[in-house]
């Protein structure tokens, strides 16, 4: 359930993460439909770089949100929780875990693809390794399946939001007080 002590920054981060995840899903389908790069088709680099930049930024936001959630848990101590609160906690834990797996596996896949990664076109990430098709495919598959799992967990999250919206709008109002 949504904590009374949630700061507006964390609420904003929640919505930025939601928008980023939505964008990343939509952009990935579009990107993969683009023709492979060649001398005539070099524009594919921009959407892939944007996708990577948003993914890396998303990972940073998620780390901040996990840190905040951990801090609040320690501050509040263990309180008696209902079954629904435990399910909500599990949903958040799975969401954070899958977001991190998606981001890290996407970055590792990109690292092994041989294509460079720059962070918002300002910071060039070093090449950690040589191009390796086998590892690129492994991390790409992990990225794909963790993203599908994330979509399932996010769907459950949205279903819970709708349940609360129609049964008790208190939690919903807390997430919209920006």
Image (cartoon, rainbow, N blue to C red):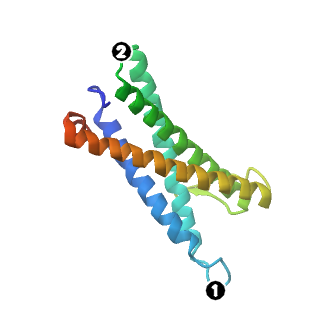
The residue closer to the viewer here, 2 or 148, is 148
Q: Is residue 78 left or right of residue 46?
A: left
Q: Position of residue 5 (x, y in %)?
A: 28, 26
Residue 40 is marked as 1
Q: For the residue carrying disc 2, how many other residues have a C-alpha within 10 Å: few (<14), some (14-19), or many (20+)?
A: few
Q: Is residue 93 left or right of residue 143?
A: left
Q: Is residue 8 above or below residue 113?
A: above
The residue closer to the viewer here, 158 or 130, is 158
At numbered mark 1, what does the secondary structure look like: helix, strand or loop?
loop
Q: Are marks 1 and 2 in contact (CB under 8 Å)?
A: no
Q: Is residue 33 above or below residue 97?
A: below
State which quarter of the image contains the C terminus: top left
Q: Position of residue 28 (x, y in %)?
A: 53, 64
Foreground label between 1 and 2: 2
Q: Position of residue 6 (x, y in %)?
A: 30, 30
Q: Is residue 59 above or below residue 66?
A: below
The residue closer to the viewer here, 86 or 3, is 86
Residue farthest toward the bottom in the current orientation of the protein: 40
Distance from Cα at disc 1 to Cα at disc 2: 63 Å
Which residue corresponds to the image point at 20% horizontal and 35% vertical from the top-left?
Answer: 168
State which quarter of the image contains the N terminus: top left
Q: Position of residue 64 (x, y in %)?
A: 45, 35
Residue 80 is marked as 2
Q: Quadrant of residue 76?
A: top left
Q: For the residue carrying disc 1, how many other residues have a C-alpha within 10 Å: few (<14), some (14-19), or many (20+)?
A: few
Q: Is residue 166 left or right of residue 90?
A: left
Q: Earlier in the sequence, mark 1 or mark 2?
A: 1
Can residue 151 be seen at all in this image of the molecule? yes
At numbered mark 2, what does the secondary structure look like: helix, strand or loop?
loop
């Amino acid at each position: 359930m949504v904590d009374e002590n949630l700061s507006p920054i964390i609420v904003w981060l929640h919505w930025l993460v939601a928008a980023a995840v939505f964008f990343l899903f939509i952009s990935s389908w579009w990107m993969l439909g683009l023709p492979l790069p060649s001398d005539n088709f070099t524009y594919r680099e921009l959407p892939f770089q944007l996708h990577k930049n948003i993914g890396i930024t998303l990972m940073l936001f998620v780390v901040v949100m996990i840190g905040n959630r951990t801090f609040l848990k320690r501050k509040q101590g263990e309180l008696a929780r209902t079954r629904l609160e435990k399910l909500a906690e599990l949903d958040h834990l799975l969401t954070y875990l899958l977001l991190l797996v998606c981001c890290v596996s996407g970055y590792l896949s990109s690292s092994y693809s041989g294509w460079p990664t720059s962070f918002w076109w300002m910071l060039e990430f070093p090449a950690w390794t040589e191009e390796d098709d086998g590892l690129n495919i492994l991390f790409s598959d992990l990225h794909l399946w963790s993203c599908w799992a994330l979509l399932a967990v996010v769907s459950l999250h949205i279903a819970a939001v709708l349940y609360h919206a129609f049964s008790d709008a208190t939690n919903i109002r807390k997430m919209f007080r920006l």
